[in-house]
Image: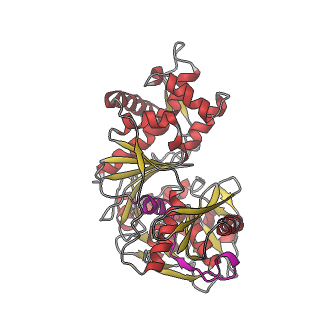
Amino acid sequence: MFVLGIDSSTQSTKAVVADAETGRIVAEGKAHHPAGTEVDPWAWWTAAQEAVAHAAAGAPGKIEAVSVAGQQHGMVALDGAGNPVRDALLWNDTRSAPQARALIDAHGAATLAERTGLVPVASFTLTKLAWLAQNEPHHADRVDRVLLPHDWLTWLFAGRPERACTDRGDASGTGYYAPATGRWLPDLLREAMGGRTPRLPDVLGPAESAGRASGFAPLEGALLGAGTGDNMAGALGIGAGPGDVVVSLGTSGTAFAVADHPCADPSGLVAGFCDATGRYLPLVCTLNAARVLSGTASMLGTDLAGLDRLALEAAPGAGGLSLLPYLEGERTPDLPDATGTLTGLRGTNMTPENLARAAVEGMLCGLADGVEALRAVGVEVRRVLLIGGASESAAVRAVAPSLFGVPVEIPEATEYVALGAAKQAAWAISGSTTPPDWELRSQPCPAANIYQGEAVRHTYRTAREQIHGF
């Protein structure tokens, strides 16, 4: 039996067909998305159809079930006819930072963390809806329902039924859902939208079905899983267990772990999400990850392989250079208007090798701080599982163990978000009370000098405090 998982990410849609028993991927498809921090949601639908059609054409048998994982937080506001009232605002759109601060001023960070698991930043859906109400009231007046990217695609695959659905994982990233009780918080949504009350999707359990695919031939009649957010699907796909912290280095950087109890961090560093299995997913997110490496490579007139070579020729600490890699503003720490800063420049260390090394160390230091924040809320950290495009970098693999201070393993390269969605689809069709147990294959990174890593992190932390005050 074969199942299909979809990862509708910031940059593209990936689709994988997997054997439902073993998780072995037998076919794949991919289609790109438009660039930008606001995108027409129909572009995601076009890309999803293209990627799925390509994957389904390579499948050795009928696809029995499908689930969609999507980028979290994106605001998909629909009118009464089910059409977007405007382009969706993505997770990395920071225009709603003033609305996030206003929500904290009105309610208090501790209260919001306790109620929603989150302290608002510009990433979350709630702040984007507040921005919409204040800046485009003519659009806000037309909003009949609000969905997230994965909800939108699942709803379209289901043939646009009267009721839309989501799951607790993606719902927990909106800012108007209570992870501890599993309920929407319509009062917060109503306040953010200036008294307007758009409809919200039904929240399904991890293995519940959203119906069957209708109107798209390659999937016609296939069971639809609940779907989830991309980070939740990544954790499910990789099979994260106790003591595992997953660090994902994609467009954004994330550090997350599966937990048995909800998290409410009043500092806002850790987002208290739900996961895709009925448990919880405390998570730290940075806006700047792989793009730090690609941007630095471009500035140095080389490619990513060239950046690796340069970085590995420099000594740990990059001769005193430290890069605060806030190229697109930052979410953790909450610095939406920040820019990148290179500190420690001297005539003796201004070399391409040191700059390349500082880029790798700066990107990883931000995630190492995230792992420390997870420890502070009670997460056990025995090993780091490093995934995402930038985990393939030789320099990243060489530097990461010293900065994280625990063993680092690189799981076999695959599309873990799409694989997690496929695993959810297999779970939904199995009728089991637990998800499938698919084997994880990984390789350890070489051991590193932790004392050198502590020195690098100290320099990074000092630079951040000097520039930003904390």
Q: Nearer the viewer, residue 139 or 74?
A: 74
In this picture, is 466 found above or below 149? Answer: above
Q: Is residue 338 left or right of residue 382?
A: right
Residue sitting at x 69%, y 65%: 54
Query: Percent position (x, y) of residue 442?
Result: 42, 49
- In the image shown, does 260 or 192 lie closer to the viewer? 260
Residue 200 visible at all:
no
In-image side of 397 versus 50 (left or right):
left
Q: Based on the displayed image, in which of its 4 quarters is residue 211 positioned?
A: bottom right
**Residue 74 in the image: above or below residue 292:** below
Colour scheme in use: secondary structure
Residue drawn at 42 percent across, 32 percent down:
460
Residue 223: x %, y % from top left = 55, 80
Judge left or right: residue 113 versus residue 308: left
Q: Please name whichever residue, 208 or 326, is drawn nearer the observer in this view of the structure.
A: 208
Q: Is residue 215 magenta?
A: yes
Magenta region: 213-239
